[in-house]
Amino acid sequence: MKEEPEHLKSLYRISMPMIMFFTSTSINLFQNFIFNIVGKRKGVTISYNIGLQVFSFLNFVGSSFWTYLADKTRNHQAIFFFNCIMYGVLAFFLFMIDNFQSVNLKLNLILFITICREFTLSGFTSIMFALIINYCKRYNYDNSLLGMANVCYNSGVAFAMFLNWAISYFFHNYNIVGIFVSFFIFIA
């Protein structure tokens, strides 16, 4: 096994769980505002928006796919980077939907983008946990780092729920504010 300098060990013990916290907060905060923004599009009914959320089951399929692909290629970082770029591109296209005139075309594009986005989103957490597991194996760590990352990930989900409430309570146009907050949390 490789031996790592002591100062890097303590840095990774802090930074990996914090990355999990910020990533989960950003993703969960952004997901809420995506569905709010989609729900305000012309032709999108409440039942259509609820129906779109059913596609979250693709997270199970996508998680297996992305993890298998990352393990097969042994390049988890590239797969994770690809998922980040794809998620950003799909979110950008979702914001550009209003440029189309046909309501049916908008609804079909929203459906297609939602399916692709949910499939892409599933790669985030599974690959991040795989990266932490690989790191622990490489440097002969115990799995306490994985447990701490899991706690921080779940704390990020809870923090996103609180931020959703706070943003919707204090700001009238909370979709834009929520997107900026989630973007800056992801950058952090």
Image: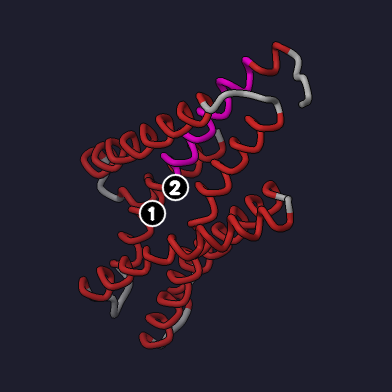
Which color scheme does this rendered protein use? secondary structure
Q: Is residue 84 above or below residue 100?
A: above
- Looking at this view, is 127 or 182 the one in front? 127
Q: Position of residue 43 (x, y in %)?
A: 29, 80
Give yes or no for residue 120 being in the magenta stretch. Answer: no
Residue 87 sits in quarter? bottom right
Give yes or no for residue 20 being in the magenta stretch. Answer: yes
How many C-alpha atoms fall within 10 Å of the one at disc 1: few (<14), some, or many (≥20)?
some
Q: Position of residue 21 (x, y in %)?
A: 46, 33
Q: Quadrant of the C terminus?
A: top right
Q: Position of residue 92 (x, y in %)?
A: 53, 63
Q: Is residue 69 above or below residue 126?
A: below
Q: Which mark is residue 9?
A: none
Q: Which residue is mark 1?
A: 31
Q: Mark 2: which amino acid?
A: Ile
Q: Is residue 151 left or right of residue 88?
A: left
Residue at horizontal 45 percent and vertical 43 percent from the top? 26
Range of residues picked out in magenta: 10-27
Name the dominant secondary structure of the magenta segment.
helix
